[in-house]
Amino acid sequence: MNWISNYVRPRINSIFSRREIPENLWHKCDACGTMLFHRELTDNMNVCTNCGHHMGISPRERFHALFDGGIFSEVEVPAPLADPLHFRDQKRYPDRMRAAQKATGEKEAMLVVEGEIGRTPVVAVGQDFRFIGGSMGMYVGNAMIAAAERAVSLGRPMVLFSATGGARMQEGILSLMQMPRTTVAVQMLKEARLPYIVVLTNPTSGGVTASYAMLGDVHIAEPNALICFAGPSVIEQTIREKLPEGFQRAEYLLEHGMVDRVTPRTEQRDELIKIIRMMMKMPRAIKADLPAPGPDTAGEPLQVAPPEPAQDQSDPK
Amino acid sequence: MTRLHPVMKEYRWQLHLYLSAVIYPADVSERQMTNYLDFEKPLAEIEGKAEELRAVARENQEMDLEAEAAALDEKAGALLVDLYKDLTPWRKCQVARHPDRPHCKDYIEAIFTEYTPLAGDRNFADDHAVMGGLARFDDQAVVVIGHEKGNDTQSRLTHNFGMARPEGYRKAIRLMEMADQFRLPIITLVDTPGAYPGKGAEERGQSEAIARSTEKCLQVKVPLVSVVIGEGGSGGAVAFATANRLAMLEHSIYSVISPEGCATILWKDAERMREAAEALRLTAQDLHQLEVCDKIIPEPTGGAHRHRSDAMENVRVAVRDMLKDLSDLSPKELLKERRSKFLAMGSKGLAA
């Protein structure tokens, strides 16, 4: 009996369980329910190949698809004070941060990089909605300032991909103060006469929309992205009536004159190249799948930020 | 039953108010107007008792209850000092939102002269949640802009409870541009629960209007000083408070989100607003430590709503001092100073 239960049964189980298909190979579209093969979805930048629904994408994945040869280098962002208010709700703020870092493998909610898009040098900033809702805290403010300073020193345009629920409550008033701080960052670009292009993705709301995300020279929105100051549920509670279909969505904003264009994610690269090259008075771009820039055009060596397990280990259990 | 004339019916409340004003002498009606906050309940009881004693004494001339009433007054005074000595953050929120607290309109009447309101954003409408125009402060011509909440049902509706729509921010932008053009200092008075979350406001670009207003604050080459006189609610406040110098009244608050909103999101329960108010660090004292607020303006004992003119005088002195501080700076320096203030912000945390 012992021999059977300890040896035979586990062997039999292991043979059968191995045949199970890993779950993450297929992804179900949130909108139409089509099963999409993961590689197909990644190749299409997380846009459903059946219905064109735009699913969330991390800044790193997006930049891999955006930059020539998928090569970019990160711009260093000065680290702010950690937990200046000693904030505690149901969880301690530092614990929330560590959980988000572990889940995303990123340091914070914003990624600042530089590289070339269609041989057009840019500084790009991407917000990560997976990281505490892409919320704007002091790091995001520092990131915007670092990005603007880098763009000004290199004489490059800046592109922002916004994705956020708004200000980070855990940093209290200091997160609110990122509204003027990021506005100063945008002013640096304007004074240097460098284009600042904002790509609004789903969702962009709150204090971010009310500061740097609405101050672009050109506003491009992703289809059906929610872009607002106050969210639809807050408005419904306030005015006590049902909101119309498509309210605060990209197309609605286009109709109301708040964005310049609504462009699908897969077409954004070409559009950005076109617009930036015109604004920078550069010659027309050659449309091609450009490889990575050669050694003569490369800026700095590729830095891949390793996820930081050190912090987790130091956490006393 | 007597039938009221339809006109009388419509105006009976006003009639009632009018009659009560006639019946009660001024000092009594002022006392009756006191709106007590929930934590002031013991105080209300004592003051109520003193009032009762005095009423009894008025009716029976032979009874002398003045000594007892005075003792109660003294007790009430001590209690008031005690209550306001160490207000919790949530109580501060309540005081900051007190309906009798002087509002923007009161400050403009009290500490400015020749106030000339200027209306409209030249685009869509005039937003009554935002007051603004030309005025003299200490005889110096200035532009004053502020949120007005209103002080009774009618005026609260007119002023939309101090919640501005895009037109309000665009009016402010226009006034700030004008101030910049004619080199007039700008004084802003902040008192808003936040920007209005409505359908039309969103359609007309609430977020863009706030962003542009903050941007304009950072662009003007004139002194810009701001005072939080009550509630500094989120982005709606930033749009006016991005100033060279920011002062806050002792019991005012300035926060990224209302305690109720924060409690709903983080605790999934709006009733946990006390904890949220603690966690958010929204009091003038905490903000001074974080170097977001440059100056705390003292309030009379028992809050600005108990001694309105004293509170307003304190604000006048603070604004005068802040403007004096900035008077030596050139237009370029003013701009630079404002920017570097915000760029440096956040380098200081709170002590554990």
Image (spheres, rainbow, N blue to C red):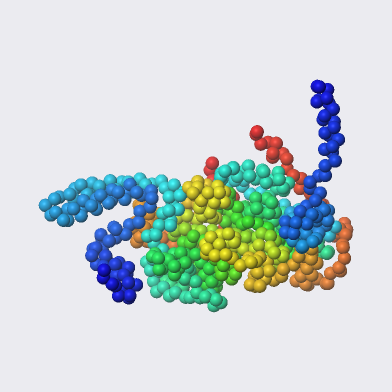
Q: Which quadrant, please, contains the C terminus of chain A? A: top right
The tally of labels here is 0
Nearer to us in this view, B297 or B167: B167
Nearer to us in this view, A34 or A220: A34
Q: Residue at x 29, y 70 (%)?
A: B15
Which residue, as the protein is rendered here, is positioned at the far front?
Answer: B1
On the image, the x and y values in percent for residue B331 come to 55, 68
The answer to whether residue A107 is seen in the rendering is yes
On the image, the x and y values in percent for residue A120 come to 81, 65
Give the quarter of the image for residue B6.
Answer: bottom left
Q: Residue at x 86, y 68 (%)?
A: A287
Which residue, as the protein is rendered here, is positioned at the far top?
Answer: A2
* A232 relative position to B34: left or right: right
Nearer to us in this view, B100 or B346: B100
* B250 relative position to A220: left or right: left
Q: Which quadrant, please, contains the N terminus of chain A? A: top right
Position of residue A49 relative to residue A281, above or below, is above
Which residue, as the protein is rendered here, is positioned at the far bottom?
Answer: B122
On the image, the x and y values in percent for residue B252 come to 45, 55
Q: Residue at x 41, y 73 (%)?
A: B115
Nearer to us in this view, A45 or B97: A45
On the image, the x and y values in percent for residue B146 come to 47, 66
The answer to whether residue A42 is seen in the rendering is no
Which residue, as the protein is rendered here, is positioned at the far left?
Answer: B62
